[in-house]
Image (tube, grey):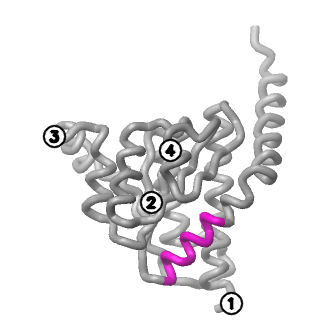
Amino acid sequence: MIDKKKFVTDSLLESSETKLKMQKECSADILAAIDLLVNAYKNSCKVLLCGNGGSAADCQHIATELMIRLNHQITRPALAAIAITTDSSNLTAGGNDIGYENVFARNVQGLGNEGDVLIAISTSGNSGNVIKAVEMAKQKKMKTIGFLGGSGGKLKPLVDVPVIIPSSNVQRIQEGHITAAHIICELTELELYGNS
């Protein structure tokens, strides 16, 4: 029988240990991601986000933080961000007509412009449709940030800034992605509007 109390304790300790590892291993990449976003927004560009499953939910979460706001002490305009994971008609038509592996790339092709940023989320770093989206972003001369895990997978060398959560546990990787995203979103808005 499972020891539930021990499971809770172990999970919380593993989560906190992952965050401490992130401080050592991810800080430079988090700062680089902030610089990419600040530069994009200063040049009237936008952010697109893609990922599957829980990572698709993270795309919506992050896009919302950028569009609405994260720091309630700041009054600012919306920062343009689109989670290309949310349109069920688009995704199902794309999956049916051009293959699910192409649905994100198709949206990047249609919505992305030079100077925009694609945030590509994949806990393994090996999601085929996310890889194709990054490849399309490169064709469109967009910048790319990868929220990845483990070794970073195939996406690590493809993205401009890989934020790789130092864990092989999907739950901890996803928690790390949202922690990194909150830091990135808040520092981006502080950089842009913190003095206004």
Task: Report the residue at 53% width, 58% height from top.
Answer: 160
How far, Cα to Cα, is label 2 from label 4?
A: 13 Å
Provide the secondary structure element on which disc 2 rests: strand
Question: Which image quarter is the C terminus in?
Answer: bottom right
Report the amino acid beneath label 2.
Answer: Leu
Q: Which residue is mark 4?
A: 155
Q: Which residue is mark 1?
A: 195
Give, as a single range, the part of the protein colored magenta. Answer: 32-42
Question: Which image quarter is the N terminus in?
Answer: top right
Does residue 38 lie above or below 52 as drawn?
below
Q: Main secondary structure of the magenta part?
A: helix
Tell which circle, 2 or 1, labels the residue nearer the N-terminal end: 2
Tell which circle, 2 or 4, labels the residue nearer the N-terminal end: 2
**Can you tell which of label 2 and label 4 is closer to the viewer?**
4
**Can you tell which of label 4 and label 3 is closer to the viewer?**
4
Q: Which residue is mark 2?
A: 118
How far, Cα to Cα, is label 4 from label 3?
A: 25 Å
Tell which circle, 1 or 3, labels the residue nearer the N-terminal end: 3
Report the amino acid beneath label 4.
Answer: Leu
x and y percent of residue 57 in the render?
A: 48, 47
Q: Which residue is mark 3?
A: 97
Tell which circle, 3 or 2, labels the residue nearer the N-terminal end: 3
**Mark 1 and mark 3 residues within 8 Å of each other at the beta carbon:** no
x and y percent of residue 19 in the render?
A: 77, 47
How far, Cα to Cα, is label 3 from label 2?
A: 24 Å
| Classed neighbour count for the residue bearing mark 2: other residues with Cα under 10 Å, few (<14), some (14–19), many (≥20) | many
| Classed neighbour count for the residue bearing mark 3: other residues with Cα under 10 Å, few (<14), some (14–19), many (≥20) | few
Does residue 73 lie above or below 124 as drawn?
below
